[in-house]
Amino acid sequence: MLGGAFSTMGRYWKQLFGLAAALYGGAALLMAGAVAVAYSAVSGHLDHVISLDYDESASSTDIVPLVVAGGVLALLGIVTMAVVSGLMYAAVPAVLQEAVLGRPAAFAAVWRKAWAHVAPVIGALILTALVATVPVLLVMAAFIGVIISVLTMDSGGAAATAVTLGILGALVTGPLAAWIWIKVCLAPAAVVFEGRGPVAALRRSAELVRGDWWRIFGITLLAALIAGAAGYVIQIPFSVLGLFPGMIGTASLEEDPSPTAVIVAMSGYMVATLLGQLVSQIISTTFPQLVTGLLYVDRRIRTENLGPALAEAAGVPAQGGPMPPPYGGGAPQW
């Protein structure tokens, strides 16, 4: 699986990295523009709050615009990242669908297929996050409630009990969340390959994972570790290069600089850091999804006799007669 993912990344790097760079780069430019607009709108309030003495309190006329601007930026960031992530989670299986057949993948065709499936893919991702994190969130909420009640009672023994319950809850819900996550990890691939809706894709993923959970868990975990390590290593040179313009810019600052002067002085460091994070994000998103897509194809080959259908789609003569699919009549659809 890992070798196949590296091979696919090497053969289709233009489509994968080009689309990822366009999406994440566009998202970064959009957010940078939004931050610039928000800062120009509330810069006066921000300067006034920063210039207050330690014994002074900011008025609501300054706080409310800052909170509103921050909330709008946060909402825009969430929506932007949801759309970008949905497009990437749809684009990688779209490329892989051509790669397993040995066919070229045109950039425009990949974009059209990804855009056509972005809504159900986002739905599948949201449902996946919900079903995997709800148990953990419930335990965290209960734990926080116990801590608050303990603090109000000021009991050391009760505090130890609350901490113990929190640890036990994490030990119980952590594996449960991991089990659910792996059960539904093939859902984005099912959306793109089979055109299923979000709920049907989650059911399809659970069906394919059945009987092979540990193997899929190990391969998925290893792929995530490889992508995370590669992303971390990639960020290091960008961070080091960003230190030089950062040091030069901050050295020229006055004794009491304004927020605008600080931002301008640190702009070189921020640009280098953002570039490093962009490249790291591309790697950490693309590689695990390639592995997940290959796991989806592998499970269909093992359980549904997909090999002859792939050979027929690729124009390769089948070796021997077709085997009956285990899940009911007809050849498997590709």
Image (cartoon, rainbow, N blue to C red):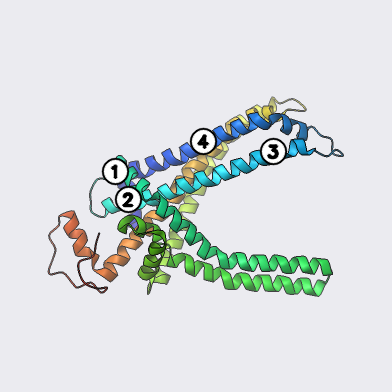
Vertical placement of residue 255 versus 92, above or below? above
Disc 3 to disc 2, C-alpha distance: 42 Å
**Residue 80: mark in rendering:** none
Vertical placement of residue 307 versus 235, above or below? below
Disc 1 packing (10 Å; few <14; some 14–19; many ≥20): few
Please identify, in this view, whether the residue under mark 4 or under mark 3 is nearer the observer.
3
Does residue 313 appear in this view? Answer: yes
**Residue 94: mark in rendering:** 2
Disc 3 packing (10 Å; few <14; some 14–19; many ≥20): many
From the viewer's perspective, is 106 left or right of 143? left
* For marks 4 and 2 on the same chain, the one whose residue lies earlier in the sequence: 4
* For marks 3 and 2 on the same chain, the one whose residue lies earlier in the sequence: 3
**Residue 30: mark in rendering:** 4
Disc 4 packing (10 Å; few <14; some 14–19; many ≥20): some
Where, quadrant-wise, is the C terminus in this rendering? Answer: bottom left
* For marks 1 and 2 on the same chain, the one whose residue lies earlier in the sequence: 2
Disc 4 to disc 2, C-alpha distance: 26 Å
Residue lying farthest to the right in this orientation: 55
Disc 2 packing (10 Å; few <14; some 14–19; many ≥20): many
Disc 1 to disc 2, C-alpha distance: 9 Å
Where's residue 40, x and y in %?
64, 28
Q: Are marks 4 and 2 in contact (CB under 8 Å)?
A: no
Please identify, in this view, whether the residue under mark 3 or under mark 1 is nearer the observer.
3
Residue at image x 29%, y 53%? 97
From the viewer's perspective, is 152 left or right of 168? right
Say what amino acid the circle numbered 1 marks.
Answer: Ala
The residue that disc 3 covers is 66
Residue at image x 76%, y 72%? 160
Say what amino acid the circle numbered 2 marks.
Answer: Ala
